[in-house]
Image (cartoon, rainbow, N blue to C red):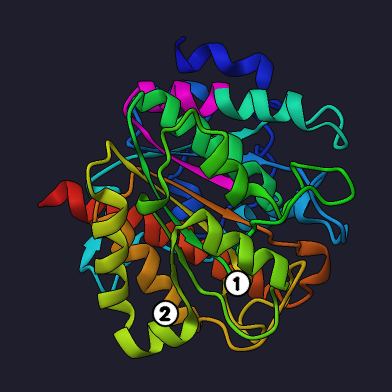
Amino acid sequence: MRISELGPHLVDEELFADEPLHASFRERCARGLAAAETAAVTLFGVPFDAGTYKHYGVHEGPMGIRQALAHFRTYSIELGIDFQEILTVADIGNIEVANWREYEPTFERIDLVLRTLLAHGTVPVMLGGDHSISFPAIRAFARHHGAPVGVIWIDNHYDTMPPFRGDALFCGCPMRNVITQCDGLVAPENVVHIGSRGYGNSATSARGAHELGFEILTMDDVDELGVKATMQRALELAGNGTAGIYMTVDIDSADVVYAPATQSPRPGGFTSRELMRIVREAGVGGVAAFDVVEVAPAIDPLGTTQLLAAELVLEAIGGVAARMAT
């Protein structure tokens, strides 16, 4: 399928036509399906929160992140590059969510959009939405490759819960689903979870994480290793014998000071600077698809959480550009 044929599965691609553009990134990010045909990186949103138990409005995350992107430019101090000189970025809008209570129609659209983008060689960056959407995205990534893939999961929570009140697709379950329901293409030894700390996980979820057997690097581990060495280890494990690496970032991996507007804000997480470097290292290190999830603009009056999420989107793009430039 051509990218241009995705139209019926997306909201109107003129969605952002009346949005004021007052900064370089939003001015220079091409919009619409035609632009994505030749873009190196393509953004799309999934305004979905059926998987949440606290309906704080993470379905508004995609638009909130886009609004925050208007405050940023395309030059990276750390990388020393202006990524717009190296690659093009397109935004194809949001996947249509006809009924927020139903997983399958939205998950099917995620599968179709992601696999279509990957087939055209563009790096997809998915804007969430609750964390349940990472399961169909990673499954689509694995099916596209038809071979084992690696996953780097940045999150305070293990997301290995059994079905919550009968809901196996709940946002506390996607890591379990990724390992058990991706056609055997995601092996535990190629999955790295980074960012757990404190008292945010249940004993049941922790036992499930250890039983599933993926690598766990807690915040204490990150403190001891350092961010650079942490990412070197993560990329090595996720890339060992795999055809590609997917990174998902739950914004609650950041300390509550930096990301208060999310379902489960907690102290003790990453600083903004640490999280920026993690995503940048992932882009430079070869990660081929990203998502940023769990941003709730309705409870973000100062825009703190949206700004961090937008910065992470840019770090992913900048890292991909730096990789292309070498």
| 200 w.r.t. 75: above or below | below
- Residue under numbered circle 2: 274
| 42 w.r.t. 74: above or below | above
Q: Residue at x 64, y 48 (%)?
A: 174
Sequence-wise, the earlier of marks 2 and 1 is: 1
- Residue under numbered circle 1: 156
Say which quarter of the image contains residue 144: top left
Q: Residue at x 32, y 74 (%)?
A: 230
Labels 2 & 1 near each other (Cβ < 8 A): no
Q: Nearer the viewer, residue 189 or 127?
A: 189
Q: Nearer the viewer, residue 53 or 98?
A: 53
Q: Which residues are magenta?
A: 112-128
Q: Does residue 209 belong to the magenta stretch?
A: no
Amino acid, disc 2? Glu
Amino acid, disc 1? Asn
Real-space Cα distance between discs 2 and 1?
14 Å
From where the camera sits, is residue 113 visible?
Answer: yes
Q: Nearer the viewer, residue 228 or 184?
A: 184
SS assignment at label 2: helix
